[in-house]
Amino acid sequence: MKADADKLSRLLKTARGQIDGILKMMEEDRYCIDISNQLMAIEAIIRKVNNEVLHQHIDNCVKEAIETGNTSDKLEEIKTIIDKLSK
């Protein structure tokens, strides 16, 4: 993967830390809205990481496929991802 691995790794480690925090909040029977807010923060991080990975895929893998004339597989992959994201 050609994405900024350090940046994405930091974001994912942040999400992992937030998940641990949510587990602790649940054990402590914290207020539901506070837990929900933390869950939404994790979702935002995951969306951001996925967005960056997909952008890098287009900028590198798809671009390379276009240059070599081998686009059918990459286009199918993108269609599949779009279908998954739209659910």
Image (spheres, helix red, strand yellow):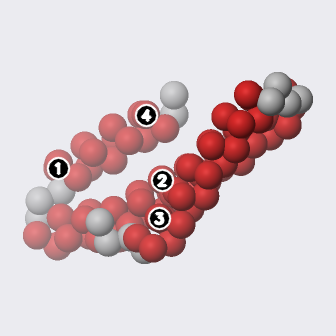
Quick one: quadrant of the N terminus? bottom left
Q: Is the Cβ of the residue at disc 1 closer than 8 Å to that at disc 3? A: no
Query: Mark 3, mark 2: which one is toward the viewer?
Result: 3
Write the residue at 71% across / 37% down: 24
What SS does tag 2 mark?
helix
Q: Which residue is mark 2?
A: 50
CA–CA distance between discs 2 and 1?
22 Å
Residue 30 picture quarter: top right
Classify mark 1: residues with Cα within 10 Å, few (<14), some (14-19) or many (20+).
few
Instruction: Please name whichever residue, 30 or 60, is drawn nearer the observer in this view of the structure.
Output: 30
Q: Which residue is mark 4?
A: 84
Query: For this view, does 44 lie left or right of residue 82?
Result: right
Classify mark 4: residues with Cα within 10 Å, few (<14), some (14-19) or many (20+).
few
Does residue 40 show up? no
- Relative to residue 3, is residue 70 depicted above or below? above
What SS does tag 3 mark?
helix
CA–CA distance between discs 1 and 4?
19 Å
Amino acid type for the residue under numbered disc 3: Ser
What SS does tag 4 mark?
helix
